[in-house]
Image (cartoon, rainbow, N blue to C red):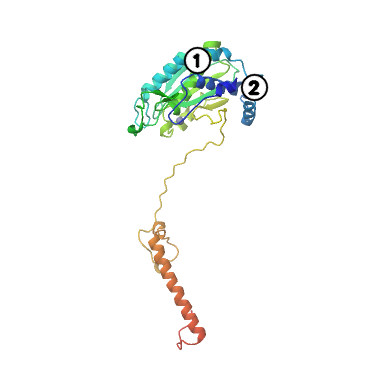
């Protein structure tokens, strides 16, 4: 069943999810299986092993939910398109607060308790579903902001007019990250509609500044440490592996920005006056012209030494100058 859910799922740059229920099925399965089989263990390799071998005996019976997803796939598609139509460009702030409110409304309709939480920049949208005490908690992370769509002339169809071509949706943000987290939200909706509850507590955190480097995320996490407590975090912000299998990624790289300022001499410093205690400007010594000049003088000096040494040994100088 899992395999059926995965087959045919295609993701791409800005050509997002197939316009049917496959992505929603997959989102549902991803967190359901994490919950059901991983039992939120700390040893994630264990989860990987289980997922790799998931087969019918371990697969939960989700047929009623899959049927609901299939029945509603066109409605889901229309909802996703409605979401994609709304610009939310964090770099300029265009549409950010409107989209934060919009997606908060979607989450409320699904049945989550939602807050739009201010930060020093663009707000976080935070939704919760409480399945009851004792149930483990899964936190789903995504971001509702998108990259600026420039250069506009490169787009075959306008970035905020979602268009379906060859089984893919083309719109800014569909592949990063509106498509992914919207699929997660629809998976929650489908489960709640069919079963009236979720199998675990769920928290959904949608950020509005991911595309500008998440400048307020550390502060937000520090301030809301208790509210964000979870047994498992699923980052719903990546592609599906080309083999179609669900994957868990380890060793995600961070980004380190460094600004290096070096201060040195603003001119050549003669070693006879300055000795070894004052470094030349590294920019000077790395200059090819300066290096060539230094090499030329060094070679000249060595040649001179060799000549004098040879002359001394041959006793032909006839002078009282000391040998070098
Ligand atoms: Zn992203």
* Foreground of the two, 270 or 170: 170
- Ligand 1: give its quadrant: top left
Q: Position of residue 2 (x, y in %)?
A: 59, 22
* 268 lies left or right of 252: left
Pointer 2: residues within 10 angstroms few (<14), some, or many (20+)? few
Query: Among all residues in the image, which is located at the extreme bottom?
Result: 318
Q: Position of residue 7 (x, y in %)?
A: 55, 24
Residue 55 marker = 2
Query: Among all residues in the image, which is located at the extreme right?
Result: 57
Q: Position of residue 212 (x, y in %)?
A: 40, 34
SS label for mark 2: loop
| Sequence-first disc among 2 and 1 | 2
- At x 53%, y 36%, the residue is 252
Q: Position of residue 139 (x, y in %)?
A: 53, 24
Residue 189 marker = 1
- At x 39%, y 56%, the residue is 283
* 45 lies left or right of 267: right
């Amino acid at each position: 069943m899992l395999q059926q859910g995965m087959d045919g799922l295609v993701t791409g740059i800005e050509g997002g999810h197939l316009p049917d229920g496959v992505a929603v099925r997959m989102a549902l399965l991803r967190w359901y299986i994490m919950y059901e089989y991983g039992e939120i263990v700390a040893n994630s390799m264990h989860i990987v092993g289980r997922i790799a071998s998931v087969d019918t005996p371990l697969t939960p019976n989700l047929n009623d939910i899959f049927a609901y997803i299939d029945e509603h796939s066109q409605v889901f598609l229309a909802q996703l398109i409605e979401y994609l139509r709304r610009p939310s460009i964090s770099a300029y702030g265009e549409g950010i607060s409107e989209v934060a409110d919009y997606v908060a409304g979607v989450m409320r309709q699904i049945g989550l308790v939602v807050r739009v939480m201010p930060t020093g920049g663009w707000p976080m949208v935070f939704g919760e579903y409480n399945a009851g005490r004792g149930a483990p908690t899964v936190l789903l992370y995504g971001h509702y902001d998108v990259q600026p769509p420039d250069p506009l002339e490169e787009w075959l169809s306008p970035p905020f007019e979602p268009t379906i071509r060859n089984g893919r949706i083309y719109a800014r943000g569909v592949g990063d990250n509106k498509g992914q987290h919207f699929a997660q939200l629809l998976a929650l909706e489908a489960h709640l509609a069919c079963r009236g509850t979720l199998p675990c507590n769920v928290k959904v955190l949608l950020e509005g500044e991911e595309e500008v480097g998440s400048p307020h995320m550390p502060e937000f996490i520090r301030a809301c440490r208790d509210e964000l407590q979870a047994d498992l975090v699923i980052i719903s912000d990546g592609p599906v592996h080309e083999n179609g299998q669900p994957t868990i990624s380890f060793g995600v790289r961070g980004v380190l920005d460094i600004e290096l300022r070096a201060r040195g001499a603003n001119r050549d410093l003669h070693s006879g006056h300055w000795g070894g205690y004052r470094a030349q400007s590294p920019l000077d010594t790395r200059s090819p012209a300066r290096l060539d000049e230094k090499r030329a003088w060094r070679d000249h000096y060595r040649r001179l030494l060799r000549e004098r040494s040879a002359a001394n040994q041959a006793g032909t100088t006839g002078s009282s100058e000391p040998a070098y």
